[in-house]
Image (spheres, rainbow, N blue to C red):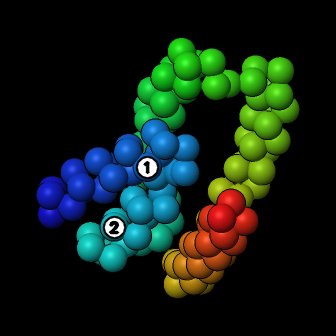
Amino acid sequence: MIFWEIFAGILGGIIGGMGMGGGTLTIPILTIFLHYEQLRAQGINLIAFLPMSVAALIIHIKNHLVAFKQTWLLALIGCIFSLGGALIANHISSAILKKLFALFLIGLAIWQIIEINKKN
């Protein structure tokens, strides 16, 4: 079991460092292979996200890829809506939360395919 937790951390860190969001892989690994409840997997992902995001942010700042003037508004809005999302998630069953997350991943995949095809 420790192998899958390490594997989830490695993949989540790599994908998170690239800017996509490691939870797109970490959460399915935790729920499918380790049989964590959806809400617990999301909580673990959020805690793991903190040090990963700090490391990625330091690298992006060094490469002059952070627009500080626009960042504060995005961070404020993100904090407000993440609080709201967490409150809502606490009142939704794990089964529904899994389905909503699956729909999110499907939507993300479709959007990525469309964006790739726009560039070609």
- Can residue 93 be spotted in the picture? no
- Marks 1/2 in contact by CB < 8 Å: the verdict is no
Closer mark to the observer between disc 1 and disc 2: 1
Q: Quadrant of the C terminus?
A: bottom right
Image quadrant in which you'd find residue 89: bottom right
Q: Position of residue 9 (x, y in %)?
A: 31, 49
Residue 114 shown left or right of residue 96 in the figure: right
Q: Position of residue 115 (x, y in %)?
A: 69, 64
Q: Give the Cα distance between marks 1 and 2.
A: 13 Å
**Which disc number belongs to residue 29?**
2
Residue 2 shown left or right of residue 13 in the figure: left
* Residue at 75 percent of width and 34 percent of height: 75
**Which disc number belongs to residue 43?**
none
Along the line of sight, the residue nearer the viewer: 21 or 110? 110
**Which disc number belongs to residue 15?**
1
Element type at mark 1: helix
Q: Position of residue 43 (x, y in %)?
A: 48, 54
Q: Identify which amino acid the numbered label 2 is placed on.
A: Ile
Q: Identify which amino acid the numbered label 1 is placed on.
A: Ile
Image quadrant in which you'd find residue 73: top right
Image quadrant in which you'd find residue 119: bottom right
Above/below status of 43 relative to 120: above
* Residue at 15 percent of width and 63 percent of height: 1
Say which label, 1 or 2, has the lower sequence index: 1
